[in-house]
Image (tube, rainbow, N blue to C red):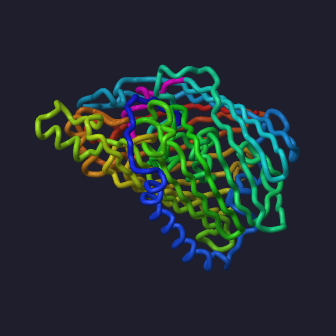
Amino acid sequence: MLKSGFSRRTLRAKAPFASIFSRCHPILLAIALLIAESVPAALAQLPDITGSQKSAIDLGNEPSPTMFPHSADGKFWISGQVNAIYQTHTPFDASYSGPHSFQPSYEKATSRVATLYTGLQFTKSTEVLVDFESAGGLGLSGATGIAGFPNLDAVRDATLSQTPYLSRVLVHQIIALSRDRPEANRGPLSTFSELPSRRLELRAGKFSITDFFDANSAGSDSHLQFMNWAIDQNGAYDFTADARGYTWGVLAEYQCPAWGMRFAEALMPGPNNGGPLVWNLRRANTSNGEFELHRAFLRKKSGSIRLLAYANNANMGVYRYAIQQYLDGKVAKPDLAQHPLQVTTKYGFGINFEQALNANTIAYGRFGWNNGKTETWSFTEIDQTFTAGLGLLGPMWKRRNDRAGIAFASNGISSEHARYLSYGGLGSVLGDLGLRYHRELEVESYYTSHIWRGVFLGPDLQYIMNPGYNHDRGPVLVPAFRLHLEL
Protein backbone atom coordinates (compact mmCIF):
# COMPACT_ATOMS: atom_id res chain seq x y z
CA MET A 1 0.00 0.00 0.00
CA LEU A 2 1.26 3.48 -0.85
CA LYS A 3 0.09 5.99 1.68
CA SER A 4 0.51 9.62 2.62
CA GLY A 5 1.79 10.93 5.90
CA PHE A 6 1.61 13.88 8.28
CA SER A 7 4.71 15.06 10.09
CA ARG A 8 4.92 14.72 13.86
CA ARG A 9 7.99 14.57 16.06
CA THR A 10 8.90 11.28 17.66
CA LEU A 11 9.92 11.10 21.28
CA ARG A 12 12.54 9.51 23.50
CA ALA A 13 11.60 6.07 24.78
CA LYS A 14 13.36 3.41 26.81
CA ALA A 15 16.86 2.21 26.02
CA PRO A 16 16.59 0.26 22.75
CA PHE A 17 17.68 -3.19 23.83
CA ALA A 18 15.70 -3.10 27.07
CA SER A 19 12.68 -1.79 25.18
CA ILE A 20 12.91 -4.39 22.47
CA PHE A 21 13.29 -7.25 24.94
CA SER A 22 10.53 -6.08 27.27
CA ARG A 23 8.11 -5.51 24.44
CA CYS A 24 8.97 -8.58 22.41
CA HIS A 25 9.71 -11.42 24.80
CA PRO A 26 6.01 -12.40 24.88
CA ILE A 27 6.17 -12.80 21.09
CA LEU A 28 9.26 -15.01 21.28
CA LEU A 29 7.73 -17.06 24.09
CA ALA A 30 4.50 -17.56 22.16
CA ILE A 31 6.40 -18.68 19.06
CA ALA A 32 8.51 -21.10 21.08
CA LEU A 33 5.43 -22.62 22.69
CA LEU A 34 3.71 -22.97 19.33
CA ILE A 35 6.74 -24.76 17.91
CA ALA A 36 6.90 -27.11 20.84
CA GLU A 37 3.24 -28.02 20.46
CA SER A 38 3.06 -28.16 16.67
CA VAL A 39 6.24 -29.76 15.39
CA PRO A 40 5.59 -33.33 16.65
CA ALA A 41 2.23 -33.41 14.89
CA ALA A 42 3.70 -31.91 11.74
CA LEU A 43 6.28 -34.68 11.45
CA ALA A 44 3.47 -37.11 10.65
CA GLN A 45 2.71 -35.30 7.39
CA LEU A 46 5.78 -33.76 5.80
CA PRO A 47 5.31 -32.01 2.46
CA ASP A 48 7.81 -32.55 -0.32
CA ILE A 49 8.73 -28.86 -0.47
CA THR A 50 9.80 -26.22 2.03
CA GLY A 51 7.90 -23.03 2.65
CA SER A 52 10.23 -20.50 1.07
CA GLN A 53 11.06 -22.64 -1.96
CA LYS A 54 7.49 -22.74 -3.22
CA SER A 55 4.10 -21.74 -1.99
CA ALA A 56 2.46 -24.52 -0.03
CA ILE A 57 -0.11 -24.45 -2.80
CA ASP A 58 1.65 -24.07 -6.13
CA LEU A 59 -0.57 -21.86 -8.27
CA GLY A 60 -0.51 -23.47 -11.67
CA ASN A 61 2.68 -25.45 -10.92
CA GLU A 62 4.82 -22.89 -12.72
CA PRO A 63 5.54 -19.13 -12.62
CA SER A 64 3.23 -16.73 -14.43
CA PRO A 65 4.11 -16.13 -18.10
CA THR A 66 6.37 -13.16 -18.75
CA MET A 67 7.02 -10.84 -21.67
CA PHE A 68 10.68 -11.83 -21.74
CA PRO A 69 12.33 -15.15 -20.82
CA HIS A 70 14.19 -15.52 -17.52
CA SER A 71 17.07 -17.89 -16.88
CA ALA A 72 16.38 -20.86 -14.59
CA ASP A 73 19.80 -20.30 -13.00
CA GLY A 74 22.73 -17.89 -13.18
CA LYS A 75 24.23 -15.09 -11.10
CA PHE A 76 22.10 -12.27 -12.46
CA TRP A 77 18.40 -11.53 -12.20
CA ILE A 78 16.39 -8.82 -13.92
CA SER A 79 12.62 -8.60 -14.29
CA GLY A 80 9.82 -6.11 -13.89
CA GLN A 81 6.12 -5.50 -13.65
CA VAL A 82 3.56 -2.78 -14.37
CA ASN A 83 0.18 -2.73 -12.66
CA ALA A 84 -2.60 -0.25 -13.54
CA ILE A 85 -6.01 -0.25 -11.83
CA TYR A 86 -8.96 1.87 -12.92
CA GLN A 87 -11.70 2.17 -10.30
CA THR A 88 -14.97 4.00 -9.93
CA HIS A 89 -17.89 3.83 -7.54
CA THR A 90 -21.60 4.41 -7.81
CA PRO A 91 -23.32 7.24 -5.88
CA PHE A 92 -24.63 6.12 -2.50
CA ASP A 93 -26.68 7.47 0.41
CA ALA A 94 -24.84 9.29 3.20
CA SER A 95 -26.54 11.17 6.03
CA TYR A 96 -23.39 13.26 6.56
CA SER A 97 -19.74 13.40 5.54
CA GLY A 98 -16.47 14.57 7.05
CA PRO A 99 -12.90 15.37 6.00
CA HIS A 100 -11.95 11.66 5.85
CA SER A 101 -15.20 10.31 4.40
CA PHE A 102 -15.60 8.21 1.31
CA GLN A 103 -17.39 10.67 -0.95
CA PRO A 104 -21.02 9.74 -1.77
CA SER A 105 -20.92 11.23 -5.28
CA TYR A 106 -19.60 9.40 -8.35
CA GLU A 107 -15.79 9.22 -8.55
CA LYS A 108 -13.13 7.57 -10.65
CA ALA A 109 -9.42 7.04 -10.11
CA THR A 110 -6.49 5.24 -11.71
CA SER A 111 -3.43 3.94 -9.90
CA ARG A 112 -0.16 2.81 -11.47
CA VAL A 113 2.84 0.97 -10.04
CA ALA A 114 5.91 -0.04 -12.07
CA THR A 115 8.82 -2.00 -10.58
CA LEU A 116 12.26 -3.05 -11.82
CA TYR A 117 13.73 -6.05 -9.95
CA THR A 118 17.46 -6.80 -10.06
CA GLY A 119 19.67 -9.27 -8.23
CA LEU A 120 23.27 -10.43 -8.17
CA GLN A 121 24.59 -13.63 -6.59
CA PHE A 122 28.11 -13.27 -5.19
CA THR A 123 28.25 -16.89 -4.08
CA LYS A 124 25.82 -19.82 -3.93
CA SER A 125 24.71 -18.52 -0.55
CA THR A 126 25.00 -14.72 -0.80
CA GLU A 127 23.09 -12.29 -2.99
CA VAL A 128 22.18 -8.61 -3.16
CA LEU A 129 18.77 -7.45 -4.41
CA VAL A 130 18.15 -3.88 -5.62
CA ASP A 131 14.74 -2.76 -6.87
CA PHE A 132 13.41 0.52 -8.25
CA GLU A 133 9.78 1.59 -8.37
CA SER A 134 7.52 4.35 -9.62
CA ALA A 135 3.96 4.88 -8.38
CA GLY A 136 1.23 7.38 -9.10
CA GLY A 137 -2.48 7.95 -9.02
CA LEU A 138 -4.54 8.87 -5.96
CA GLY A 139 -7.13 6.45 -4.67
CA LEU A 140 -10.85 7.18 -4.65
CA SER A 141 -11.62 9.94 -2.10
CA GLY A 142 -7.89 10.23 -1.44
CA ALA A 143 -7.87 6.63 -0.15
CA THR A 144 -9.91 7.59 2.92
CA GLY A 145 -13.34 6.72 4.31
CA ILE A 146 -13.16 2.91 4.13
CA ALA A 147 -11.01 0.86 6.52
CA GLY A 148 -10.81 -2.02 4.04
CA PHE A 149 -10.02 0.31 1.16
CA PRO A 150 -10.67 -1.15 -2.31
CA ASN A 151 -7.23 -0.56 -3.89
CA LEU A 152 -3.98 -1.77 -2.30
CA ASP A 153 -1.94 0.15 -4.91
CA ALA A 154 -3.59 3.52 -4.23
CA VAL A 155 -1.47 6.56 -3.36
CA ARG A 156 -2.82 8.80 -0.60
CA ASP A 157 -0.38 11.69 -0.78
CA ALA A 158 -0.79 13.90 -3.83
CA THR A 159 2.59 15.51 -3.13
CA LEU A 160 4.53 12.27 -3.68
CA SER A 161 6.57 12.42 -6.86
CA GLN A 162 6.18 9.83 -9.61
CA THR A 163 9.95 9.90 -10.11
CA PRO A 164 11.41 6.39 -9.70
CA TYR A 165 12.74 5.65 -6.22
CA LEU A 166 14.75 2.92 -4.51
CA SER A 167 12.19 0.49 -3.12
CA ARG A 168 14.41 -2.38 -1.96
CA VAL A 169 18.10 -2.95 -1.32
CA LEU A 170 18.63 -6.20 0.47
CA VAL A 171 21.57 -8.40 1.42
CA HIS A 172 20.44 -12.05 1.63
CA GLN A 173 22.63 -14.72 3.24
CA ILE A 174 21.88 -18.46 3.33
CA ILE A 175 23.43 -20.63 6.06
CA ALA A 176 23.00 -24.30 5.13
CA LEU A 177 21.98 -26.69 7.91
CA SER A 178 21.66 -29.74 5.63
CA ARG A 179 23.56 -31.07 2.62
CA ASP A 180 20.62 -31.67 0.30
CA ARG A 181 19.67 -28.74 -1.96
CA PRO A 182 16.22 -29.18 -3.54
CA GLU A 183 15.14 -27.06 -6.48
CA ALA A 184 13.73 -23.64 -5.60
CA ASN A 185 11.72 -21.08 -7.57
CA ARG A 186 13.89 -18.13 -8.60
CA GLY A 187 12.22 -14.75 -8.25
CA PRO A 188 12.64 -11.11 -7.21
CA LEU A 189 13.01 -11.91 -3.48
CA SER A 190 15.39 -14.87 -3.90
CA THR A 191 17.32 -15.64 -7.06
CA PHE A 192 18.72 -18.99 -5.91
CA SER A 193 17.66 -21.98 -8.02
CA GLU A 194 18.54 -24.41 -5.20
CA LEU A 195 18.22 -24.05 -1.43
CA PRO A 196 19.13 -26.35 1.48
CA SER A 197 16.04 -28.05 2.85
CA ARG A 198 17.13 -26.96 6.33
CA ARG A 199 18.64 -23.53 6.49
CA LEU A 200 18.92 -20.20 8.24
CA GLU A 201 18.28 -17.11 6.12
CA LEU A 202 19.51 -13.66 7.13
CA ARG A 203 18.37 -10.46 5.43
CA ALA A 204 19.29 -6.84 6.07
CA GLY A 205 18.38 -3.68 4.22
CA LYS A 206 15.32 -1.94 2.84
CA PHE A 207 12.24 -4.05 2.18
CA SER A 208 8.52 -4.30 2.78
CA ILE A 209 7.47 -6.19 5.92
CA THR A 210 4.75 -7.93 3.88
CA ASP A 211 7.39 -9.28 1.50
CA PHE A 212 7.93 -11.95 4.16
CA PHE A 213 5.13 -11.74 6.76
CA ASP A 214 1.44 -12.60 6.34
CA ALA A 215 2.01 -14.03 2.84
CA ASN A 216 -0.75 -16.14 1.29
CA SER A 217 -0.72 -17.73 -2.17
CA ALA A 218 -4.44 -17.08 -2.72
CA GLY A 219 -4.75 -13.62 -1.21
CA SER A 220 -1.62 -11.42 -1.17
CA ASP A 221 -1.14 -10.15 -4.73
CA SER A 222 -2.94 -7.01 -5.92
CA HIS A 223 -1.37 -7.54 -9.35
CA LEU A 224 -3.18 -10.75 -10.22
CA GLN A 225 -5.59 -11.39 -7.34
CA PHE A 226 -7.71 -9.33 -4.94
CA MET A 227 -7.30 -5.56 -4.51
CA ASN A 228 -8.91 -4.79 -1.12
CA TRP A 229 -6.64 -3.88 1.81
CA ALA A 230 -8.44 -6.21 4.21
CA ILE A 231 -8.72 -9.11 1.74
CA ASP A 232 -5.15 -9.08 0.36
CA GLN A 233 -3.63 -8.48 3.81
CA ASN A 234 -4.47 -8.82 7.49
CA GLY A 235 -6.26 -5.55 8.18
CA ALA A 236 -5.46 -5.63 11.91
CA TYR A 237 -1.71 -5.97 11.20
CA ASP A 238 -0.42 -2.41 11.62
CA PHE A 239 2.88 -3.23 9.94
CA THR A 240 5.51 -0.54 9.65
CA ALA A 241 5.92 1.27 6.32
CA ASP A 242 7.00 4.66 5.04
CA ALA A 243 4.96 6.68 2.56
CA ARG A 244 5.99 4.25 -0.21
CA GLY A 245 5.33 1.09 1.80
CA TYR A 246 8.92 0.18 2.82
CA THR A 247 11.21 0.22 5.84
CA TRP A 248 14.78 -0.63 6.86
CA GLY A 249 15.43 -3.59 9.10
CA VAL A 250 16.94 -7.00 9.73
CA LEU A 251 15.22 -10.37 9.39
CA ALA A 252 16.21 -13.89 10.46
CA GLU A 253 14.33 -16.94 9.16
CA TYR A 254 14.62 -20.67 9.75
CA GLN A 255 13.11 -23.16 7.29
CA CYS A 256 12.84 -26.96 7.32
CA PRO A 257 10.43 -29.32 5.55
CA ALA A 258 8.01 -29.43 8.49
CA TRP A 259 7.90 -25.81 9.62
CA GLY A 260 9.53 -22.41 9.55
CA MET A 261 9.74 -19.25 11.59
CA ARG A 262 10.93 -15.70 11.04
CA PHE A 263 11.61 -12.62 13.14
CA ALA A 264 12.24 -9.04 12.03
CA GLU A 265 13.25 -5.86 13.80
CA ALA A 266 12.61 -2.75 11.74
CA LEU A 267 12.30 1.03 11.81
CA MET A 268 9.05 2.91 12.35
CA PRO A 269 7.99 6.06 10.45
CA GLY A 270 6.20 9.12 11.70
CA PRO A 271 2.42 8.78 12.15
CA ASN A 272 0.34 7.57 9.22
CA ASN A 273 3.51 6.86 7.21
CA GLY A 274 4.47 10.51 7.64
CA GLY A 275 7.95 11.93 7.97
CA PRO A 276 11.23 10.07 7.64
CA LEU A 277 11.86 6.71 9.23
CA VAL A 278 13.14 7.02 12.80
CA TRP A 279 16.63 5.50 12.99
CA ASN A 280 16.99 5.91 16.76
CA LEU A 281 15.50 2.81 18.38
CA ARG A 282 15.15 4.80 21.60
CA ARG A 283 12.32 6.66 19.88
CA ALA A 284 10.51 4.00 17.89
CA ASN A 285 10.86 0.37 16.80
CA THR A 286 8.80 -2.61 15.68
CA SER A 287 9.21 -6.34 16.28
CA ASN A 288 7.50 -8.98 14.15
CA GLY A 289 7.44 -12.77 14.56
CA GLU A 290 5.73 -15.49 12.55
CA PHE A 291 5.57 -19.27 12.87
CA GLU A 292 4.67 -21.27 9.75
CA LEU A 293 3.48 -24.86 9.71
CA HIS A 294 3.84 -26.61 6.33
CA ARG A 295 0.84 -28.87 6.54
CA ALA A 296 -2.86 -28.84 5.69
CA PHE A 297 -6.14 -29.33 7.49
CA LEU A 298 -7.11 -32.00 4.93
CA ARG A 299 -5.15 -35.22 4.53
CA LYS A 300 -3.11 -35.57 1.33
CA LYS A 301 -3.76 -31.92 0.42
CA SER A 302 -1.25 -29.07 0.37
CA GLY A 303 -1.61 -26.19 2.77
CA SER A 304 0.00 -23.87 5.30
CA ILE A 305 -0.91 -22.33 8.64
CA ARG A 306 0.84 -19.16 9.86
CA LEU A 307 0.70 -17.55 13.30
CA LEU A 308 1.75 -13.90 13.51
CA ALA A 309 2.57 -11.58 16.42
CA TYR A 310 3.92 -8.03 16.42
CA ALA A 311 4.59 -5.07 18.71
CA ASN A 312 5.04 -1.44 17.65
CA ASN A 313 6.58 1.19 19.95
CA ALA A 314 6.18 4.83 18.96
CA ASN A 315 4.72 8.19 19.94
CA MET A 316 1.17 6.99 19.31
CA GLY A 317 -1.88 8.82 20.60
CA VAL A 318 -4.24 7.00 22.97
CA TYR A 319 -7.98 7.03 22.20
CA ARG A 320 -9.04 7.15 25.86
CA TYR A 321 -6.85 10.17 26.58
CA ALA A 322 -8.06 12.03 23.47
CA ILE A 323 -11.70 11.37 24.42
CA GLN A 324 -11.16 12.57 28.00
CA GLN A 325 -9.57 15.79 26.77
CA TYR A 326 -12.67 16.42 24.67
CA LEU A 327 -15.10 15.61 27.49
CA ASP A 328 -13.17 17.94 29.81
CA GLY A 329 -13.62 20.76 27.30
CA LYS A 330 -9.91 21.15 26.62
CA VAL A 331 -10.30 20.66 22.84
CA ALA A 332 -13.13 21.31 20.38
CA LYS A 333 -13.02 17.71 19.19
CA PRO A 334 -10.90 14.69 20.04
CA ASP A 335 -7.41 14.96 18.60
CA LEU A 336 -4.90 12.11 18.79
CA ALA A 337 -2.03 14.54 18.15
CA GLN A 338 -2.69 16.26 21.50
CA HIS A 339 -1.16 13.77 23.88
CA PRO A 340 1.61 13.62 26.49
CA LEU A 341 5.21 13.10 25.50
CA GLN A 342 5.37 9.34 25.85
CA VAL A 343 5.93 6.18 23.87
CA THR A 344 3.05 3.75 23.71
CA THR A 345 2.75 0.21 22.37
CA LYS A 346 0.39 -1.40 19.92
CA TYR A 347 0.54 -5.17 19.75
CA GLY A 348 -1.47 -7.72 17.81
CA PHE A 349 -1.83 -11.27 16.58
CA GLY A 350 -2.93 -12.96 13.38
CA ILE A 351 -3.77 -16.36 11.90
CA ASN A 352 -3.37 -17.03 8.20
CA PHE A 353 -4.12 -20.29 6.39
CA GLU A 354 -4.36 -21.66 2.85
CA GLN A 355 -5.80 -25.03 1.94
CA ALA A 356 -5.96 -26.84 -1.42
CA LEU A 357 -9.41 -28.35 -1.95
CA ASN A 358 -8.47 -29.88 -5.29
CA ALA A 359 -5.96 -29.24 -8.07
CA ASN A 360 -7.64 -25.97 -9.09
CA THR A 361 -9.42 -24.66 -5.98
CA ILE A 362 -7.80 -23.01 -2.96
CA ALA A 363 -9.51 -21.89 0.25
CA TYR A 364 -7.84 -19.27 2.39
CA GLY A 365 -8.57 -17.14 5.41
CA ARG A 366 -7.19 -14.74 7.98
CA PHE A 367 -8.06 -13.58 11.47
CA GLY A 368 -6.42 -10.53 13.01
CA TRP A 369 -6.61 -8.61 16.27
CA ASN A 370 -4.76 -5.73 17.91
CA ASN A 371 -5.23 -4.05 21.27
CA GLY A 372 -7.10 -1.09 19.73
CA LYS A 373 -6.00 1.39 22.39
CA THR A 374 -3.58 3.48 20.34
CA GLU A 375 -3.94 5.17 17.00
CA THR A 376 -3.24 3.45 13.70
CA TRP A 377 0.34 4.24 12.77
CA SER A 378 1.12 2.76 9.36
CA PHE A 379 -1.65 0.67 7.79
CA THR A 380 -5.38 1.11 8.33
CA GLU A 381 -8.00 1.55 11.04
CA ILE A 382 -8.94 -2.05 11.73
CA ASP A 383 -8.64 -3.58 15.20
CA GLN A 384 -10.29 -6.94 14.46
CA THR A 385 -10.75 -8.66 11.11
CA PHE A 386 -11.90 -11.95 9.63
CA THR A 387 -11.45 -12.90 5.97
CA ALA A 388 -12.39 -16.02 4.01
CA GLY A 389 -12.13 -16.66 0.29
CA LEU A 390 -11.62 -19.00 -2.63
CA GLY A 391 -9.05 -18.89 -5.41
CA LEU A 392 -9.83 -20.69 -8.68
CA LEU A 393 -7.28 -21.68 -11.32
CA GLY A 394 -7.85 -21.53 -15.06
CA PRO A 395 -7.27 -25.20 -15.94
CA MET A 396 -10.67 -25.84 -14.39
CA TRP A 397 -12.26 -24.14 -17.44
CA LYS A 398 -9.41 -24.86 -19.87
CA ARG A 399 -7.73 -21.44 -19.54
CA ARG A 400 -4.31 -22.47 -18.27
CA ASN A 401 -3.05 -19.11 -16.93
CA ASP A 402 -6.33 -17.46 -15.96
CA ARG A 403 -7.46 -17.18 -12.37
CA ALA A 404 -10.48 -15.98 -10.43
CA GLY A 405 -11.50 -15.49 -6.83
CA ILE A 406 -14.17 -14.42 -4.39
CA ALA A 407 -13.67 -13.35 -0.77
CA PHE A 408 -15.48 -11.81 2.19
CA ALA A 409 -14.09 -9.60 4.97
CA SER A 410 -15.62 -8.39 8.22
CA ASN A 411 -13.75 -5.60 10.02
CA GLY A 412 -14.25 -4.00 13.43
CA ILE A 413 -12.68 -1.51 15.83
CA SER A 414 -12.42 -1.27 19.61
CA SER A 415 -15.07 0.52 21.66
CA GLU A 416 -12.64 3.35 22.46
CA HIS A 417 -11.75 3.73 18.79
CA ALA A 418 -15.47 3.88 17.89
CA ARG A 419 -16.19 6.49 20.59
CA TYR A 420 -13.33 8.64 19.31
CA LEU A 421 -14.80 8.65 15.79
CA SER A 422 -18.37 9.19 17.04
CA TYR A 423 -17.29 12.38 18.87
CA GLY A 424 -15.91 13.77 15.60
CA GLY A 425 -12.27 12.69 15.88
CA LEU A 426 -10.19 12.11 12.76
CA GLY A 427 -8.10 9.01 12.23
CA SER A 428 -5.48 8.27 9.62
CA VAL A 429 -8.10 6.85 7.24
CA LEU A 430 -11.51 7.54 8.81
CA GLY A 431 -13.40 10.61 9.95
CA ASP A 432 -17.08 11.21 9.13
CA LEU A 433 -17.51 13.68 12.08
CA GLY A 434 -19.98 11.19 13.52
CA LEU A 435 -20.55 7.45 13.73
CA ARG A 436 -23.39 4.97 14.09
CA TYR A 437 -21.21 1.94 14.54
CA HIS A 438 -21.66 -1.30 12.62
CA ARG A 439 -19.00 -3.70 11.40
CA GLU A 440 -17.62 -2.88 7.96
CA LEU A 441 -18.32 -5.71 5.50
CA GLU A 442 -16.72 -6.28 2.09
CA VAL A 443 -17.26 -8.80 -0.68
CA GLU A 444 -14.83 -8.87 -3.61
CA SER A 445 -14.62 -10.96 -6.76
CA TYR A 446 -12.10 -10.77 -9.58
CA TYR A 447 -11.20 -12.44 -12.85
CA THR A 448 -7.70 -12.23 -14.36
CA SER A 449 -7.37 -13.28 -17.98
CA HIS A 450 -4.05 -14.13 -19.61
CA ILE A 451 -4.00 -12.37 -22.99
CA TRP A 452 -0.51 -12.96 -24.41
CA ARG A 453 2.90 -13.68 -22.89
CA GLY A 454 3.06 -11.42 -19.80
CA VAL A 455 -0.12 -9.45 -20.48
CA PHE A 456 -3.07 -9.91 -18.10
CA LEU A 457 -6.44 -8.12 -18.07
CA GLY A 458 -9.51 -8.46 -15.95
CA PRO A 459 -12.41 -6.93 -14.01
CA ASP A 460 -12.92 -6.66 -10.27
CA LEU A 461 -16.08 -5.88 -8.31
CA GLN A 462 -16.42 -4.95 -4.62
CA TYR A 463 -19.54 -4.41 -2.52
CA ILE A 464 -18.94 -2.55 0.74
CA MET A 465 -21.47 -2.20 3.57
CA ASN A 466 -21.10 0.37 6.38
CA PRO A 467 -18.04 2.12 4.92
CA GLY A 468 -15.91 3.43 7.77
CA TYR A 469 -18.06 1.37 10.22
CA ASN A 470 -20.87 3.90 9.71
CA HIS A 471 -24.39 2.56 9.30
CA ASP A 472 -25.49 6.06 8.23
CA ARG A 473 -23.49 5.72 5.00
CA GLY A 474 -23.52 3.29 2.10
CA PRO A 475 -23.58 0.62 0.85
CA VAL A 476 -21.32 1.31 -2.09
CA LEU A 477 -20.44 -0.65 -5.23
CA VAL A 478 -16.85 -0.35 -6.54
CA PRO A 479 -16.17 -1.80 -10.01
CA ALA A 480 -12.60 -1.86 -11.35
CA PHE A 481 -10.53 -2.97 -14.30
CA ARG A 482 -6.90 -4.01 -14.11
CA LEU A 483 -4.05 -4.23 -16.64
CA HIS A 484 -0.95 -6.12 -15.52
CA LEU A 485 2.31 -6.63 -17.38
CA GLU A 486 4.79 -9.24 -16.16
CA LEU A 487 8.09 -8.34 -17.81
**Front in this rendered view, residue 238 or 430:** 238
Using residue 319 as the reference point, say whether residue 218 is left or right of it: right
Looking at the image, residue 197 lies above or below residue 394 = below
The residue range painted magenta reads 137-148
**Residue at position x 84%, y 52% from top?**
124
**Front in this rendered view, residue 120 or 278:** 278
The majority secondary structure of the magenta stretch comes to loop
Number of disc labels: 0
**Front in this rendered view, residue 54 or 94:** 54
**Can residue 184 be seen here?**
yes
The answer to which image quadrant residue 92 occupies is: top left
Does the magenta-highlighted stretch encompass residue 198? no
Does the magenta-highlighted stretch encompass residue 145? yes
Using residue 143 as the reference point, say whether residue 48 is left or right of it: right
Residue 371 horizontal/vertical position (percent)? 35, 55
**Residue at position x 47%, y 54% from top?**
387
Residue 207 horizontal/vertical position (percent)? 62, 41
Q: Quarter holding the C terminus? A: top right
Residue 222 horizontal/vertical position (percent)? 59, 40
